[in-house]
Image (cartoon, helix red, strand yellow):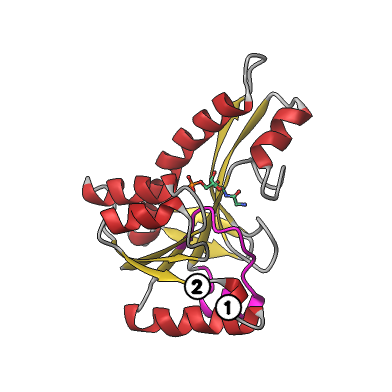
Amino acid sequence: MKLAIFASGQGSNFSAIVKAIKDGKIKVGLVVLVCDKPEARVISRAKKAKTAVILVKREDFSGRAEFEAAIIQRLKSYKIGLICLAGFMRMLSPGFVRKYHNRIMNIHPSLLPAFKGSHAIKDALDAAVPFTGVTVHFVDEEMDHGPVILQQKVRITSKDTLASLEKRIHSVEHKLYPRAIRFFCEGKIKVRGRKVEISNP
Ligand code: GAR
């Protein structure tokens, strides 16, 4: 199984997946990083991990269709079986999602459907809810939406700051994402409509 990671930011999830592969916890070949931000820290992490990088800047293309066509074209030779979005802050078009139907996962720092969007941790803190969490899900045409694979709760305490909550959420993410990838690679995930079934987790 060949894996591509799409990321635009720090890349801590990228590194957690690299480590899980190195430790033999997931049998997958991480063959390429797709990144849309030349300044993103994830690029240096990919170079360190000796992973190929496809850098595609949205502003170099006249529209989303051209941008995505360039990604698809450049991914072709890798024969990708799974795409993991790890802080890739762009919506993929319905056409792209259809092409990799139920083969694109996303990680999101909330218990979806609560707190969609790019400030989910701060939004949960501001809302003063007792729990937030992490969701790994298959990607569909809507933002932070699609069949849920795994979710884990994270408690919010009265002492939490954005930094402390972010830290706990990230450490949950770094375990949950490799776990979801492992289930996928082991063929344990079945999607029935909007429901995910995992056999012998
Ligand atoms: C992660 O917390 C991920 O859940 C979030 O971006 C962060 C990327 O961190 N994704 C979303 O908010 C998607 N809507 P990283 O670059 O350190 O892996």
Dot 1 falls on a residue whose secondary structure is helix
The disc labelled 2 sits on which kind of residue? Val
Which residue, given by chain and number where applicable, does mark 1 sit on? Answer: 60
Which residue, given by chain and number where applicable, does mark 2 sit on? Answer: 56
Asked if residue 86 lies in the magenta stretch, the reply is yes
Q: Nearer the viewer, residue 31 or 103?
A: 31
Whether disc 2's CB lies below 8 Å from ligand 1 is answered no
* Residue under the image location 43 percent in, 51 percent down: 41
Range of residues picked out in magenta: 84-102
Q: Position of residue 10 (x, y in %)?
A: 47, 47
The disc labelled 1 sits on which kind of residue? Asp
Q: Position of residue 117 (x, y in %)?
A: 70, 50
Please identify the quarter of the rendering in which residue 106 is found: bottom right
* Residue under the image location 51 percent in, 52 percent down: 9
In this rendering, position of residue 86 left or right of residue 126: left
Residue 89 visible (yes or no): yes
